[in-house]
Amino acid sequence: MADDREDADLVAFLRQNHARELSTPMRKPGEDTEKRESVETRSSRRCREGPIIGPCVVCEDPRGSIHFGVVSCAACSAFFRRTIAENRKYSCRRSFDGHFNCPIDQKHRCYCRACRLQKCLLMGMDPGSVQLHRDTYGSKIKRALEQSSSQCQPNTRLNLASFSKSSSSLKEIVNGANSQHIPSPSSATLAEQLIIFSRSPVIAKKSVEDYSANRDTIANDCEAPSSSVGPKQSFASIAPPVSCPPSEIGETQSRNMIEGMVDSYRQMLERRRLVYCPSSIRDILSGTMPTSRPACYYGERVRRDRLRVDIALLVEFLNNTPPFPTLDVDDKIALMKNFSVSFSILEKYYITMRAGGLQTNRIFHSDGTYTDLEDPDSITEEAKRVAGKEVDRETLNKLFVQPLKEFLLELSGPMYHNNMTDVEFCALTAILLFDPIASGLTEVGSRIVREARDRVYNDWFGFYDKNGVHDIGQRVGNTMLLLPAVQTIVETTQENFRLIQVFELFQYDKILDELMYLDT
C-alpha cells in the first residue's frame, strides 16, 4: 500500500510539472541568458552604487552615495579608485605653481584630472579606503597578457643588439623613481597598436595611400657611433661615418635605433659644448659647459655665425640616423625642411625643462643663452635698433612674449611632470623626422620613411622592454601627447616669422626662409 501511494504521488507531481511546462510560452534562444545577465547587471550596479543620498561633493551630480567616506557619484568614485589603486600622477596644464583653479562640476569634471583629484582629496575622500588589486577581471586580463607575451614568436619582435657598456646609465635614466608599476601588455603588441595609431590624422594631417610593407627596401643603414657621452663629459673620439661599408650593414640593421639616436644626440651636445664653452684649452679639455647668460638681443641665435653651426650639427646628427643617409638628395631636403623647425622647438623647450626654465620663467637656448620672459623690453629695444623706428611695445609683447609664456607651459610643463629623458626626446625626434607624408617626398622615399617610423616604434618599445621598464604604455602615451603642442607652436612660429620678414624686425640668416617655407 505504501508503495502504491508513493507511485501515485510521483505520477501526480509529474503531471502537474508537465502542465506547467505546457502553459509556459516558448522562449527564444538566448532569452533566458539575456534576462539573467540583465538581472545580474542591475544587481551588481545597485551593489556598486549604493542608495542615493544626495549630490556628489566633487562634481555636484545629484545621484550620489557614500564612497570612500563622502557622498560622491559613481563616476568620481571610480576615478578616485583608479587613480589611487594605479598610483597615477596628473598635472594641470593651466598651472605649474601648485594652484588648482580648473572648474570641476558635472559638465566639466573630465576637463582636468589633476584638479579633479585635488578636489576629491579636499572634499575628504580617503585614499586608505581604496582596495588595491580587487579587480578580478583585470587579473584575468593580466594573466592572459603574460601568457601571450611568453608565447610570443621570435619574429614578432626585432632582434636587438647587445647594449654597449656606456648604455648602463640609460637604464638608470629610464627606470627613474617608479615605485609602483601598471601592468602592461607585451612590447610587440603595443608597438603594433602604436604603428596603426600613428597613421591616423592625430599625427598625419592628410591621408596618403598605404604603401606595401617591404623592409628589404631599407638598405645601407648608417650606424651611429657607439660611444655615449654625457653633456658634461669630455669626448675622446668624434669622427662619425657618413656612410657604412657593406660589411657593417647587417650589424647596423640589428642595432636598436633609439639607442643609436641617444648616442648621436649626446655626441651633438658634446660638439656644441666645444663650440660654445669658454675659449681656453683647459675648459675645452676638462668638459666645461657654456656659461648661462642672458641673450645679448632677441635675434642673436638666428645670426649667420650661430645658425650655421646649429644647422651643421643637425645635419651631422641626421647623417648618423639611418636610413636618412641612404635617401635621395631631394628626399633629404624634403625631410630637412619638414623637420628642422619642429626639432628646434622641441629641443629648445627640452633644454629649458632640463635647465629649470619652467620655474624661473626663462627659455634656454642651445648656445647657453636664455631669454627672460619677465624682461620684454629687451625684445622691444632690439626691434627698434634694427627697424630704425619706434616699435609698439604692446604689439611685440602680444606677438612674441605672451606666446612664449604659453608655449613654456604647454611643452616644458608636461616634459617636467613626465620626467622626460633623452630616450623619450630622441624617440619623439625620430617620429617627427620620419614623416611619410612630408611635402616633396618621392614615392620610394615615402615608403622607406614609413618603414623607418615603424622600426622606431618597435625599437622604442624594445628598448624599454630590455631595460625592465614596466609602465611602457604610459611613458609612450605621455610622450606622444606632446605632438599636437609641437605642431601648434610650429604653426605660430611660422606666422610670427612672416611678420619678422615683412617688417624686418630682426636680422637673420636668409637660410631660414627655406626652412620656414618662405623661399617662394
Image: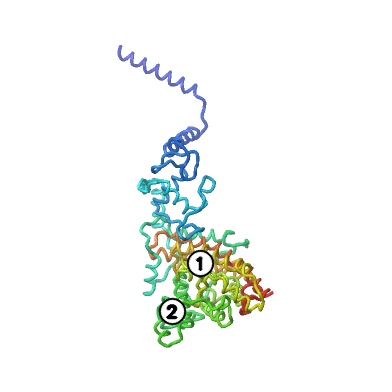
Residue type, label 1: Leu
The N terminus: image quadrant: top left
Question: Residue tagged by mark 2?
Answer: 289
Q: Is residue 433 visible?
A: no
Would residue 64 be found to the left or right of residue 436 on screen?
left
The C terminus: image quadrant: bottom right
Task: Point out the frontmost of discs 1 and 2.
Answer: 2
Crowding around mark 1 (Cα neighbors within 10 Å: few <14, some 14 to 19, many 20+) is many
Crowding around mark 2 (Cα neighbors within 10 Å: few <14, some 14 to 19, many 20+) is many
Of callouts 1 and 2, the N-terminal one: 2
* Residue 213: percent from left, percent from top: 55, 64
Q: Quadrant of residue 14?
A: top left
Question: Residue tagged by mark 1?
Answer: 428
The outermost residue toward the bottom is 281
Q: Secondary structure at mark 1?
A: helix
The outermost residue toward the top is 1
Q: Secondary structure at mark 2?
A: loop
Please state which of residues 297 and 17 is positioned toward the viewer in this rendering: 297
Vertical relation: 302 (above or below) 489: below
Vertical relation: 171 (above or below) 45: below
* Residue 487: percent from left, percent from top: 58, 64
Residue type, label 2: Met
Q: Is residue 306 visible?
A: yes
* Residue 505: percent from left, percent from top: 64, 75
* Residue 251: percent from left, percent from top: 45, 75
